[in-house]
Image (tube, helix red, strand yellow):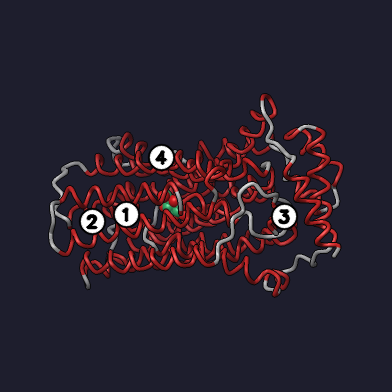
């Protein structure tokens, strides 16, 4: 009864909340951009390795297995990083954990750049993985917690935009540094220390998440921050919604994450994380040149193809930012899964019947465009919205670890499948997973557009 009154009250309150404009709007964008620098480093660190591998392969005389370790060690680090980040994010706050990630990025950039043996290289690369894992969770979480309901989708999607920018920056900087002599690969890695340092410093100027502060009983500080973002009147009402939500809640332990009440959101979070990866985005992101080569595509320059993919990725992330708070999350996930299934099906047919290689290119670009305007950003948006304030960190950890575990297996198995069952069948399997993603989203995903986080929970 009390809950239902609170719920109606929350509904009324949230309907009257309008997003900030002018100076306050600018402040909100600035702090979201600072948090989204975590995404930029996530993108950079995952992509930089492609330019580094050919050179360290020679320098350290690496075997195939060792190259595999060099590439996949980051993802293993991500898995551990995400698992470890939830509890401190709930205990010590979002900002402190983001600052730790920033420092880890700096150390990993310098450490890998200075490495004189492959063992040292892998150790620092795993450390970078911790940072990527932490950033992949805490950046979207922080943005979701400071954003007004009506803009939350687009602000969290900024994080996808910065991931993609990070990937592009890594490709460009690798390209620019390739002719700098024997130490070129060291420079490629070292470059990341700069944005990481910027991230670390910029974090001093952003406020702590008001929702986390409220959770810790620091309501006065929380209110001040909400006021700065939303203005006095809206801040008071938001604070009331947040306080109401904190009244009848669990102890915030890991046990609480698996309580029956959270079973459904957790299942949706894990499902979204799994489908974002199993549908195969990183088969293209990590292996595009290999796919192009196998399809007989006669575009001579690998750089040209990579840039084309990067640009499409970037442009369509902007499409997501435009639509996510208008069209809503669920329709975007449904349309995205469908378009991805169609493009993979075309890709599969094109491989099976050795069709014109332009068809392959078009199918790949359609696939990338569909992902980056839907499943890419919207997965992060929804996972950061699903859980109550007091367990958000831990519950997001449990969900997002499936992004990285699935990513690890997909990137590991893809070249093997390509060799064993061929491109046609491999892409057919991925298309089938897109179909499952479509069914999953139709059946389980709930619309969260425009609602306060507390109302969703
Ligand atoms: C995914 C990454 C992917 C990136 C670029 C992110 O949302 O989690 O796995 O590489 O988008 O498209």
Q: Is residue 390 above or below residue 220?
A: below
Q: Secondary structure at mark 4?
A: helix
The circle drawn on residue 284 is 1
Q: Nearer the viewer, mark 4 or mark 3?
A: 3
Sequence-wise first label, 2 or 1: 1
Residue topped by disc 3: 455
Say whether residue 258 is visible.
yes
* Quadrant the N terminus occupies: bottom right
The circle drawn on residue 435 is none
Q: Is residue 311 above or below residue 452?
A: above
Residue topped by disc 2: 291
Sequence-wise first label, 1 or 4: 1
Residue topped by disc 4: 314
Sequence-wise first label, 3 or 2: 2
Say whether residue 114 is visible.
no
Disc 1 and disc 4 in contact, CB within 8 angstroms? no
Sequence-wise first label, 4 or 3: 4
Image coordinates for residue 6, horizontal then vertical, percent: 82, 56
Q: CA distance from mark 2 to mark 4?
A: 21 Å
Disc 1 and disc 3 in contact, CB within 8 angstroms? no
Q: Secondary structure at mark 2?
A: helix
């Amino acid at each position: 009864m009390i809950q239902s009154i609170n719920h109606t009250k929350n509904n009324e309150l949230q309907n009257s909340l309008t997003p900030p404009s002018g100076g306050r709007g600018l402040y909100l964008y600035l702090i979201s951009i600072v948090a989204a620098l975590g995404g930029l480093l996530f993108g950079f660190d995952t992509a930089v390795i492609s330019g580094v591998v050919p050179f360290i392969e020679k320098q350290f005389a690496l075997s195939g297995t060792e190259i595999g370790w060099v590439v996949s060690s980051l993802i293993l680090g991500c898995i551990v990083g995400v698992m470890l980040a939830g509890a401190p994010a709930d205990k010590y706050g979002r900002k402190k954990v983001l600052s730790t990630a920033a420092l880890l990025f700096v150390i990993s950039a310098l450490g890998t750049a200075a490495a004189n043996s492959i063992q040292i290289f892998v150790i620092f690369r795993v450390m970078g993985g911790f940072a990527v894992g932490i950033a992949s969770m805490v950046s979207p979480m922080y943005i979701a917690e400071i954003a007004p309901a009506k803009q939350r989708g687009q602000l969290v999607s900024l994080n996808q935009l910065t991931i993609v920018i990070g990937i592009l920056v890594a490709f460009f900087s690798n390209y620019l540094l390739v002719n700098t002599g024997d130490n070129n690969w060291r420079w490629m890695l070292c470059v990341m220390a700069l944005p990481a340092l910027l991230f670390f410093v910029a974090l001093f100027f952003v406020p702590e998440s008001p929702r986390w502060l409220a959770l810790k009983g620091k309501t006065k500080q929380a209110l001040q921050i909400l006021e700065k973002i939303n203005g006095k009147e809206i801040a008071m009402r938001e604070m009331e919604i947040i306080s109401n939500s904190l009244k009848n809640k669990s102890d915030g332990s890991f046990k609480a994450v698996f309580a029956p009440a959270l079973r459904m959101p957790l299942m949706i979070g894990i499902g979204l994380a799994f489908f974002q990866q199993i549908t195969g985005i990183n088969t293209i992101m990590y292996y595009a040149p290999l796919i192009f080569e196998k399809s007989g595509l006669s575009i001579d320059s690998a750089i040209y193809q990579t840039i084309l993919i990067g640009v499409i990725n970037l442009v369509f992330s902007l499409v997501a930012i435009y639509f996510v708070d208008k069209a809503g999350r669920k329709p975007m996930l449904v349309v995205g899964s469908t378009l991805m299934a169609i493009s993979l099906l075309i890709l599969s047919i094109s491989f099976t019947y050795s069709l014109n290689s332009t068809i392959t290119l078009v199918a790949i670009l359609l696939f990338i465009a569909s992902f980056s305007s839907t499943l890419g950003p919207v997965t992060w948006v929804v996972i950061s919205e699903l859980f109550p304030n007091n367990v958000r960190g831990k519950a997001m950890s449990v969900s997002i670890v499936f992004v990285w575990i699935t990513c690890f297996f997909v990137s590991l198995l893809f070249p093997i499948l390509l060799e064993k069952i061929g491109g046609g069948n491999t892409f057919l399997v991925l298309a089938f997973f897109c179909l499952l993603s479509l069914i999953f989203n139709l059946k389980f995903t709930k619309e969260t557009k425009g609602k306060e986080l507390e109302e969703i929970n």
